[in-house]
Image (cartoon, rainbow, N blue to C red):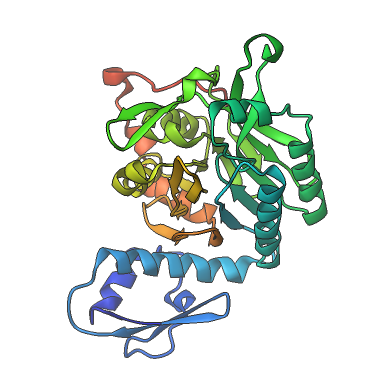
Amino acid sequence: MVLEVAADIWTFLFYQVPSHVRVVDFGIRHWSGHLKCVWNKTPTVILGHSGHFPLSLMCLLQACRRISRGLAMSAVKRSLIGVCQLSSTGDKKHNFRECERLVREGVERGACMLFLPEAFDYIASSTEETLQLAETLEGEVVQRYCQLARETGVWLSLGGFHERGPDWERDRRIYNTHLLLNEAGQIAGLYRKAHLFDVDLKGHVSLNESSFTIPGPQIEPPVATPIGKIGLTICYDLRFPEISLALAAAGAEVLTFPSAFTVTTGMAHWEPLLRSRAIETQSYVVAAAQTGRHNVGRSSYGHSLVVDPWGCVLAQCGQGPGLCCALIDLDYLCQLRRQMPLAQHRRRDLYGAVGACPQTHNL
């Protein structure tokens, strides 16, 4: 792939590259403006050219820098993640096979943690079927993923599990539960979705999640993982910045938004919301998504994303099931937070502290 950028590329590089990173980290071959970065054995060459330097290219160069540094550091620090995009149906066994295939592909590519979207276990065609298929945390679905984590030796983010509620026999209501499994197949973190999707956009979307789902009672503390401290959320939580700010204040470095966004809302808001959460919290944002048609009445937008703390998109899936990978660079995150200390600049005397989240716990 060949891209054209401004002749003033060097001015950009010297302003954007931190002082402790040498320009040769970019793999410069000639002072004429050639720039080369190798990612998964695919070369990307950027040639000097007069003209405008678009923002998307700036994001690409920043991503290339971090990829280059990450590859050089891979022997001592594994920070590659894989983000899985699914098209779940009501067939739980089929869905698991698809998830397993993507997880194992991510492991082959060197990822130390894989992220699955909301409703990774199933998307049913009716409320009745949704409730019929629900399980407990001790059920077959979760145990299968615990075994998968043990076999592959990686962490798994299970972005939205249909968990039977505490009074299941009486009220037949469920939680929408985000689970983190460590490499030993143990549950290292758990969050139950707080904001439920009750929306009626005439002629487009009509869903009433609260009719069968119990809202989660609290924000959970960030979980220490091999890629950093992870803050857990689910889908519709994305629209409420308070939860992201609370998690960041509690120490989160990576925010997760596993989702099943509708096509209507996804086309309008998906990427802007994710980039906003990354920018305002100065955190990495990982958003595994459902995609395509699940049944006659339900389709999802797709476009799974990884966004860096500057708001640049590092990796993205298109339409259809698949996998994208990105590097989490905590040195870059810490540097950005030092250079632009938003947390210190907040005027809590004017608008108070946002959220109340316990501090992170270690493994």
- What quarter of the picture does the C terminus occupy? top right
Answer with left or right where residue 151 lies relative to residue 203.
right
Horizontal relation, residue 76 to residue 191: left or right = right
Q: Position of residue 38 (x, y in %)?
A: 52, 78
Residue 282 position, x and y percent, is 41, 44
* Residue sitting nearer the eye, 89 or 86: 89
Residue at the left extreme? 51
Position of residue 315 relative to residue 341, above or below, is below
Q: Is residue 239 left or right of residue 21?
A: left
Instruction: Give the farthest residue toward the front.
Output: 296
What number of labels is visible? 0
Front residue of 185/206: it is 206
Of the pair 55 and 298, the residue shown nearer to us: 298
Residue under the image location 71 percent in, 35 percent down: 188
Q: Position of residue 18 (x, y in %)?
A: 40, 62
In this view, the residue in front, 274 or 136, is: 136
Q: Position of residue 343 (x, y in %)?
A: 39, 34
Image quarter in which the N terminus is found: bottom left
